[in-house]
Image (tube, rainbow, N blue to C red):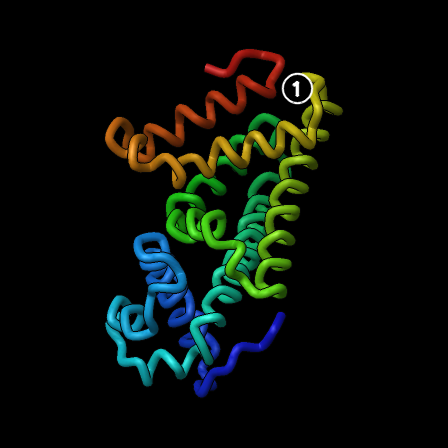
Amino acid sequence: MTNLRTYSNDDNLVANRREGIAKAASTLFIKKGYIKTTIREIAEACDISIGTLYHYIGSKDDILYLLSDISYKKSNQLVEQVKIEMRLLKSTDKMRLTLQKYLQHVDEYQDMIVFWFQEAKNMRGDARDLLFKNEYFLINLFNVLLRDGQKSGEFKEFDVNLISNNIIVMCDIWAFRRWYLRKNYTFEEFKEKQIKSILNMVCKEEVT
């Protein structure tokens, strides 16, 4: 990981502040675009001074790397949580648990997710590389789950790599299509319906 400048020695404080900065900035970037959003506006959205903001980042460009870095770390945490909780589960239940965790992630970081796909072109090379690394990381997670389900006989035969990408898109759509979905579903309603749809897409036996 590229080290971003900070004047604080409190690692927990830095991590919390940077996540808050990343969330606030991504919301502004979606509304105004990366280029038009100012550091002053980001500081105001975080309810801190510009000087305090510069305690945790060195430039606006650093936020682009920060967005990718947070995404990668959160995906790693997701995988580790799932590994711990699903050791003795059947493939179908492993997939259900993973989908629950990932959809919660999408709901919490939806502005970041929308931003990554809108503004990836503006990211510097190391940030973009980390973003792509994270995407491959998630695809591999679902590839493993799907192959295990096929081996156990619970899942249908299909192109695993393609279905993994389809699953991620079906989850991320909560962020991309929120302008419509929020008017018709609560997050819990969407989550349960989408999990059921995905499981019925991959499972041999109907999931009710």
* Above or below for 53 versus 84: below
Amino acid on which the number 1 mark rests in the picture: Glu
Who's the residue at 46% across and 22% down the image?
Answer: 196
Who's the residue at 45% across and 49% down the image?
Answer: 118
Q: Position of residue 64 (x, y in %)?
A: 49, 64
Who's the residue at 49% across and 72% down the image?
Answer: 62
Q: Position of residue 167 (x, y in %)?
A: 55, 31
Locate residue 140: give its quadrant: top right
| Quadrant the C terminus occupies | top left
Which element carries disc 1, helix, strand or loop?
loop
Locate residue 25: give its quadrant: bottom left
Locate residue 32: give its quadrant: bottom left
Who's the residue at 60% across and 34% down the image?
Answer: 165
Q: Position of residue 96 (x, y in %)?
A: 52, 31
Q: Position of residue 111 (x, y in %)?
A: 38, 51
Would residue 94 appear left or right of 157 to someone viewing this image?
Answer: left
